[in-house]
Amino acid sequence: MHSKTKWNPIPVPKVADDYEGHFRAVRLNSLGSLFWFAKHTLGKNRLTTLHTQLCKSLEVAQLFLVMEVPMSHFKTTLGIALSIFWALPFTERDEEAMRKLGYKDAWIRWMKVAHDQNTRTLVTHEIAEQAAAIGQSVDEVYEHNDMFRHTFREILPDRDCKWTNHHKFQKRLPGGGDPTTGTYEYRGVGQALQGIHANNIIQDDNFGRAAQNSLLRGDGSVCRELIGWHKQVGTRFDPIVKENRRQLVIGNAWGHADLNAWINKHQPEFKFETHSAEGGCCKLHPEGVPILPEEWTIELLHKEKARLEAGGDGGAVGDYEHFYLNLHTLPWEQIFKSEWLRYYKCKQSRPELRLEDERNILLFEHDVYGGEVIEDLQPGMLNVRIIVDPHHANKVNRSGHVIWVIGYDDSNSHIYLMDLWCENTSYSAMVDEMYRIANRWQHWRKGRGFIRMGKLASELLAFPMQERARIERHPIAFTEFDDDPSQAAQKNRIESLEPIFKTGKVWCQRYQKKFVDQFESYPAGFVDTLDTLGFFPSQLNVTGSAKLKEFMQRQQAQFVGYGG
């Protein structure tokens, strides 16, 4: 935070009583409080207590925030106000006036960070036309808002200032950084970003309907392209701006593989603020109490839900939960349930001995479920396979290569996910990893049947495998299997695992987070680990494990039709 000090709005005299005092008070209140500026100077009269809370989250020097706010709760309004708030001038006269009011050095430093007449803000939206429409709201302020125009007249653009739908330059002070980037720059998702050098970035609803449909009902390609573009947006900060960079992402939650979820996993500098229209989202909003009751009562929210879910009006089941409740994954969208997974951990049988001591063997220690205690397992008794599955252009919903080490216990049909590697790297690096993993699990190597890969995979890896074999004393041997890369075959492979998952037969380790995330979010998002795991039952059957085959057939028959 900028300081523990907060702005206490000063009284605003009537214009008729004190003309200069009126606008002086308006100016100081506008500089001191984003909420006051938005509500009173910009005239956004429908902002309420909710928005005072949101504004507090935005009034920081280093802003990296994902704000998940329900639809029609004025989150874009705040984004527009924030972009103008950043561009307000803070002069020596303003500083003097605030010091006379008792504000100290820390507060003045914050004011100089919060406001910069020369600042540059990039604003993006899913649709280029809508990005331009956001800019038109800024036009309205600069051209027609008399309160703003009179209070901050020194920044109003003149004939020398470029002012278009996509580039808007207010009056600047000399020597104020990059002169080619506007005070406000507006772009749609996918549009070129070259030449923009910004202090601030606001991404408003970049994850729109096309990406939503691609994530929830398609192959996820639109979502992946959007994530790629989001990464480009993050490169548009002016290199000179080392501190006080600000990036705000505004949008609703959609799934474990949407843009917000990607940010949460890969960009730890971002904080998240998530709100549900019906409350229960945080300490400030108890469950069952609407967060914006002035606009949305519980009755109105339920009517909106009924409207969105009614047939024939373009709505879809789940829209209400995403747009208004900010639920990432809906119960009926999740084919695989989190509680189906079982967890175990590795431990030493004799921890007092050295690791290389043959008496100190590896054991699997099972978590307890339903009061059932399973004895520690020596993995040497398992029927083990390494499944190698490289990513290539014909595979969908994939982002990387996968190597699974999987063990099967014939006595109880338990499947143990013993080791996992999943990365987007070169084929040569993948072959190196194959050797590393094979050597780690060499105690269970059983000749040619130990490592399995599809025919197409073996063709893709043929050259790096041959090159590696030239320098290896014991080159890896593997067995090929038929590999259908089509989306339909992929879906069948993955969903045929459902009966095994549902009956608690699959045991994994907590470090295998990439698998757990894909398991919990399926059918949304990437499926690298699931797709490769889907090959395991058929490959074990090749060796004559009739018990697993019988179990699979029995369970598939029992749960036929599950998930639609």
Image: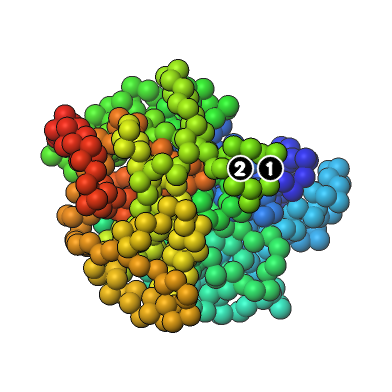
- Camera-nearest residue between 549 and 40: 549
Q: Which residue shows up at 73% across the image and 41% down it?
A: 7
Mark 1 vs 2, N-terminal side = 1
Classed neighbour count for the residue bearing mark 1: other residues with Cα under 10 Å, few (<14), some (14–19), many (≥20)? few
Labelled disc at residue 360: 2
Q: What residue type is labelled 1?
A: Leu
Q: Is mark 1 on a helix, strand or loop?
A: loop
Residue 532: image quadrant is: bottom left
Q: Which residue shows up at 28% across the image and 27% down it?
A: 303
The x and y percentages for residue 288 are 44, 21
What is the total number of numbered labels drawn onto the structure image? 2
The x and y percentages for residue 496 are 22, 43
Q: Is mark 2 on a helix, strand or loop?
A: loop
- Answer whether residue 32 is visible to the viewer in this image: yes
- Camera-nearest residue between 385 and 263: 385
Residue 349: image quadrant is: top right
Q: Up-down: is 383 above or below 464?
A: above
The x and y percentages for residue 5 are 78, 40
The x and y percentages for residue 75 are 47, 45
Q: Which residue shows up at 51% across the image and 22% down it?
A: 286
Q: Up-down: is 4 above or below 388?
A: above
Q: Up-down: is 85 above or below 457?
A: above
Q: Distance between the residues labelled 1 and 2?
A: 6 Å
Q: What residue type is labelled 2?
A: Asn
Residue 172 placement, left or right of 331: right
Q: Quadrant of the C terminus?
A: top left
Classed neighbour count for the residue bearing mark 2: other residues with Cα under 10 Å, few (<14), some (14–19), many (≥20)? some
The residue that label 1 is drawn on is: 353
Residue 199: image quadrant is: bottom right
- Camera-nearest residue between 210 and 108: 210
Circles 1 and 2, Cβ within 8 Å, touching? The answer is yes
- Answer whether residue 215 is visible to the viewer in this image: no
